[in-house]
Structure formats: structure tokens, C-alpha cells
Image: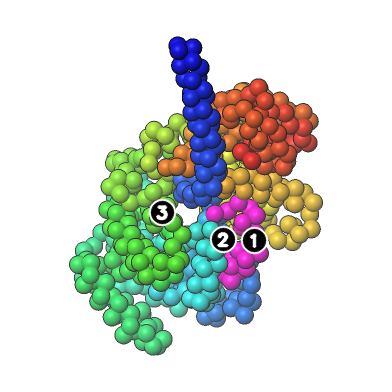
């Protein structure tokens, strides 16, 4: 009886174990069918100058008689909203693994030009606002923006616009200064303390909005005149009345602008704002702005249920010039430290130190550094890393001699990656005859992508890494762990509810046969795919063997 009982017990145990195995297989299969969540902290964000990316509609290239000869790369070049939409439809961003696009401001710019350096400059970059309520016709129309958001969302791409609350555009012969209760023009910033960074004009002739004011102010007369001429004055006033009645805010300058900016959320369904010149505005303004953005996003979702992508909150990315993640959540003005994450305002800040870290550190030191910070001091928040941008005069690789290393460090580092248009195609960042940041803002080099073998090779590398990052939140938002130092392999792990993501990456490898220890990450007999070469292999004795002609391995469960 005892033997029979023991035998029966063993059979039952084995049967249970088999059932457990069947259950485990079922769970694994279920996990593979769970949709990959979009995670802002690990997104692949493409930053472009709307005017410099792609000209799909030459008919809107000249408006408001902006026809004076300009200094080199200081005038409008024709890029427009339709041009971005065209590339979305063609799959350019999807092929590049981009899941969010940040565009420079598209609001109506000053009509005149300023004289800087060797010639005239127009507001092609979008940061010289004349009217927050209108889209500049050089960039396109409201219909164009509706189409862009619709087409982007159809491909799972989020749209981030650029918000400017700190200043209006410069004063020109066509653009009179706003009333004194709206702007200050007398004190220029010296940047040596908090007061001299916030309550002042950034540069001469860039009127500073009185964002600290709680005084009720009337609309600027130039806006009243403009709206009446356009036949929309009554409607704009009606909407403003409703906004101030709902919010209870005073009719102070900053709240007018918040209303105008959040209209782009409720009307078009944009997913986020990159906020310009954050440290030059009182920090409480951004908390107020977040409240209005969240309300507008909720209203959009409620009224457009079929267009809601997911349950992510509205995304606010702050540009606190010279902020770096090594300081944690605070920015130091010298006489005062400010936390732009708390009270709640920004989800992420642009990381100005990443290019320095990338120059000073090898892969493992770089990845470990950011892994530690993002899972400790910045836990719950994010950072946006970049290696070149529209106004950073010292990019990581100005001569474009290290496009592969640039891709590896930017796209494989913990945090959100910001690809600046042309990073992926080695667009020149040194243009002879330009002054200042104009050298960073040439037209996108589509011809080079079409014709040059070297450009195609660089672009192929960026595509493979970008698609892998977009497919695997573990890359940007997960936890980093080195497997072996030589050859260099690491893994990233990420979990969000029932979604689990595990990947193994190898860099600077020998071409040819590769024996890879994956025992810490994947179980026996699991089939893995190298997303870089397309090769597959099965885990045996904790290892897989690949034979590829590449120095990079991107392993994922097949």
C-alpha cells in the first residue's frame, strides 16, 4: 500500500508539474501577445525644425512679404507641416524607430525681420511669436495640422509641439512692441542669480512676458486689430471669457497664453509640449500650465474616444538650459535651487550634460551612470538625452566622423533619446558662411540619403537600433546590467503590469562567430533573434551561437 501510494503521489506530482508547464507556456504565449506599451521615459523622440525638414507645398513658401535678402540660413526655406506628414505617410519615421516627433513652434511669427550680424533674420525657427492663436502660413494650416496628428497617431507616433510663454517676438517695423503691462523691455538678463535670470529679457529686443503679474490686462491692441481684420475677434473673446470663467484665473498675461497654447491640445489632440526657456519663468507658472494641459488633454480624450492612443498623461518636457541629470531633480541658480519636477510640472527635462558624459565615458560607464540616476534620484521621472540640437554650438560630433558611436550611445542609453533631424544621415553641422546657431540648421539632406552609399550605411545602422529601441521599452526605461566586459554584452529588463521585456545587446564585437552567454536572461531551448543581422539561434546550455558579419548584436525573444 505504501509503495502504491508513493507511486500514485509521484504520478500526481508529475501530472501537476506537466500542467504547470502547460500553464507556463500559456502564460508565455499570452505575454507575447500583450501589446508593447508606449513609455515616454524610453521613447525615441525625433526633433526637427519645421522649416528645414521637408518642403511638400512650395505655394506657402512666401508670406507677409518676407522677401528681404537674409544672412545665410537665416530666412524661411520652405519646410512645412505637410512635409512632415509626407514623411510619416512614407514610413520614414517608422523605419527609423521613431515613436514621437517634436516640432519647433508652428504659431504665427513676426512679419518683419531683424538685423543680426551680417544680415536680416526672419522667424523661421518659430520662437518669435506674433500670434499664439494662429498657425504661420509658411508652416501650413489648421487642416494640415489635423492631418499630421491623424497620420502620426495611425502609426503610433506621438506629436509634441513647442510652447513659448517667456517672450514675444522681437520688435520690427512690422511688429510693434506689446503694451507695458504685458512685457518688459528695460532689463536684460545677466544670469548671475535667480532674479537676473527670470525677471529680464533674454537678449536685447526680445520683449519678456510679465509672467509674474496677476494684474488683469486687456488684449494687446495689435491683436485686437488683427483679429477684427481676420473676422474672428468676437469668437476669440468669447473663448477667452469662457476660459477665465471656468478657471477663475485673473486676466494676467501668462493665463492668456496658456489658454492659447492648450487650444492646440483640445482641437488637434497633440500629445505633449516641449517647453522653451523654462528657467526664465517663475517655476509656479509651469505647475499652473500643467493643470491646464491636463484638463485640455482630458477634454480631448473625452470628446474623441476613437482617437485615444492609450492612458498616458499629457507629456511636458522642459528645457532648463544647462540642467544635467547628475544634479538630480534640482537646478542651481547660484543663490537658489529650484526643483522643476516637484510640485508637479514636468515629466522630463532635457539633459544638457549627456554629450559631455558621452565624450568622457565608455559604453558601460555611460549606461551604468544613467541607470543609477534614473532609478534613484530621478525615479518616477525621465530625462531626454541628445548629442546635437538646434542651439548647442558644441555638438558631440560636429564633423559627423562618429555616426555609429553616436547612434550606439544615444539610442542605447537609459532615458529618452532625442534624435536631431539629420543625426541619422550625417547632415552637416558645419556650414561655411553661417553665423552662430544657423550652422546647425541646414535643410535636411534628402539627396545624400538617396544617392550616397556612406549615408545609406549610416542610416541603416540608425534604423536597426531605433526600431529595436521602439520595440523594447527595456532599452530606455528598463534596468541595465552588464553580462561580460570582454566581449561587451549587457541586458536590460523592464516590467509594466503584465508586460515584461528582456533584451541582450552586444557592442564592439568581433565579426564572425559569437558565443553568447544568455543564462542570466533567457531559459533553455528558447529561440532568440538577433534584430541586427536577422539571424536566429536556440539557447543551449545557457548560450547561443551566432555567426554574423556585424559588430553589434541585438537579441530578443523570437
Q: State the predominant SS element of the stretch in magenta.
A: helix
Asked if residue 315 is positioned above or below residue 145 in the image, the reply reads above
Decide if residue 342 is on the left or right side of residue 537: left
Decide if residue 537 is on the left or right side of residue 245: right
Instruction: Find residue 345 and report its horizontal and vertical position in percent.
Output: 33, 51
Q: Earlier in the sequence, mark 2 or mark 1?
A: 1
Depth check: give the residue in front, 89 or 218. 89
Residue 91, numbered label:
1
- The residue that mark 3 highlights is 312
Numbered disc in front, either 2 or 1: 2
For label 1, the SS is loop
Looking at the rendering, in which quadrant would you find the C terminus? top right
Whether the residues at callouts 2 and 1 have beta carbons within 8 Å, the answer is yes
Q: Earlier in the sequence, mark 3 or mark 2?
A: 2
- The residue that mark 2 highlights is 155
Residue that appears at 34% across and 47% down: 340
Asked if residue 238 is positioned above or below residue 117 in the image, the reply reads below
CA separation in Å, label 3 and label 2: 17 Å
Verify whether residue 403 appears in magenta.
no
Residue that appears at 54% across and 64% down: 154
Would you identify the image quadrant in which residue 308 lies? bottom left
Residue 422 visible from this viewpoint? no
Residue that appears at 77% across and 35% down: 548
Would you identify the image quadrant in which residue 439 lies? bottom right
Asked if residue 535 is positioned above or below residue 115 in the image, the reply reads above
Residue 42 visible from this viewpoint? yes
- Classify mark 2: residues with Cα within 10 Å, few (<14), some (14-19) or many (20+): some
Instruction: Identify the magenta region.
Output: 79-99
Looking at the rendering, in which quadrant would you find the N terminus? top left
Amino acid at each position: 500500500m505504501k509503495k502504491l501510494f508513493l507511486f500514485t503521489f509521484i504520478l500526481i506530482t508529475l501530472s501537476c508539474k506537466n500542467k504547470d508547464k502547460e500553464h507556463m507556456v500559456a502564460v508565455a504565449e499570452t505575454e507575447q501577445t500583450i501589446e508593447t506599451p508606449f513609455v515616454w521615459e524610453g521613447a525615441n523622440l525625433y526633433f526637427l525644425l519645421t522649416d528645414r525638414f521637408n518642403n511638400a507645398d512650395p505655394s506657402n513658401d512666401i508670406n507677409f512679404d518676407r522677401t528681404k535678402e537674409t544672412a545665410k540660413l537665416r530666412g524661411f526655406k520652405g519646410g512645412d507641416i505637410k512635409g512632415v506628414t509626407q514623411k510619416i505617410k512614407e514610413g520614414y519615421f517608422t523605419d527609423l524607430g521613431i515613436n514621437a516627433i517634436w516640432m519647433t513652434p508652428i504659431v504665427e511669427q513676426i512679419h518683419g525681420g531683424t538685423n543680426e550680424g551680417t544680415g536680416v533674420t526672419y522667424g523661421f525657427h518659430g520662437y518669435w511669436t506674433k500670434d499664439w492663436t494662429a498657425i504661420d502660413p509658411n508652416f501650413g494650416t489648421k487642416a494640415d495640422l489635423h492631418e499630421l496628428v491623424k497620420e502620426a497617431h495611425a502609426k503610433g507616433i506621438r506629436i509634441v509641439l513647442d510652447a513659448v510663454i517667456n517672450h514675444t517676438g522681437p520688435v520690427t517695423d512690422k511688429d510693434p512692441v506689446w503694451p507695458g503691462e504685458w512685457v518688459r523691455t528695460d532689463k536684460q538678463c545677466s544670469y548671475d542669480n535667480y532674479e537676473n535670470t527670470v525677471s529680464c529679457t533674454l537678449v536685447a529686443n526680445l520683449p519678456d512676458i510679465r509672467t509674474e503679474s496677476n494684474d488683469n490686462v486687456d488684449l494687446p491692441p495689435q491683436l485686437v486689430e488683427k483679429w477684427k481684420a481676420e473676422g474672428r475677434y468676437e469668437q476669440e473673446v468669447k473663448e477667452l471669457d469662457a476660459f477665465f470663467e471656468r478657471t477663475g484665473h485673473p486676466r494676467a498675461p501668462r493665463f492668456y497664453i496658456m489658454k492659447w497654447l492648450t487650444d492646440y491640445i483640445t482641437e488637434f489632440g497633440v500629445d505633449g509640449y516641449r517647453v522653451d526657456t523654462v528657467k526664465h519663468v517663475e517655476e509656479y507658472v509651469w505647475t499652473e500650465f500643467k493643470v491646464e494641459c491636463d484638463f485640455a488633454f482630458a477634454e480631448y480624450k473625452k470628446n474623441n474616444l476613437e482617437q485615444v492612443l492609450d492612458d498616458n498623461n499629457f507629456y511636458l518636457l522642459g528645457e532648463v538650459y544647462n540642467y544635467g541629470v547628475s544634479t538630480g531633480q534640482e537646478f542651481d541658480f547660484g543663490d537658489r535651487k529650484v526643483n522643476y519636477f516637484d510640485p508637479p510640472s514636468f515629466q522630463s527635462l532635457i539633459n544638457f550634460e549627456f554629450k559631455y558624459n558621452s565624450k568622457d565615458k565608455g559604453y558601460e560607464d555611460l549606461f551604468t551612470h544613467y541607470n543609477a540616476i534614473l532609478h534613484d534620484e530621478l525615479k518616477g521621472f525621465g530625462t531626454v538625452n541628445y548629442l546635437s540640437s538646434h542651439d548647442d554650438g558644441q555638438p558631440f560630433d560636429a564633423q559627423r566622423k562618429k555616426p555609429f558611436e553616436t547612434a550606439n550611445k544615444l539610442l542605447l542609453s537609459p532615458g529618452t533619446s532625442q534624435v536631431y533631424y539629420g543625426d541619422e544621415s550625417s547632415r552637416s553641422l558645419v556650414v561655411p558662411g553661417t553665423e552662430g546657431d544657423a550652422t546647425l540648421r541646414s535643410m535636411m539632406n534628402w539627396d545624400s540619403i538617396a544617392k550616397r552609399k556612406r549615408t545609406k550605411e549610416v542610416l541603416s545602422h540608425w534604423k536597426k537600433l531605433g526600431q529595436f529601441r521602439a520595440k523594447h521599452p527595456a532599452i530606455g526605461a528598463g534596468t541595465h546590467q552588464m553580462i561580460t566586459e570582454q566581449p561587451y554584452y549587457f541586458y536590460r529588463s523592464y516590467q509594466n503590469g503584465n508586460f515584461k521585456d528582456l533584451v541582450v545587446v552586444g557592442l564592439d564585437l568581433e565579426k564572425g562567430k559569437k558565443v553568447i552567454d544568455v543564462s542570466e536572461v533567457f531559459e533553455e531551448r528558447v529561440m532568440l533573434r538577433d534584430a541586427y543581422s536577422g539571424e536566429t539561434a536556440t539557447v543551449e546550455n545557457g548560450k547561443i551561437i551566432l555567426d554574423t558579419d556585424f559588430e553589434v548584436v541585438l537579441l530578443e525573444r523570437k
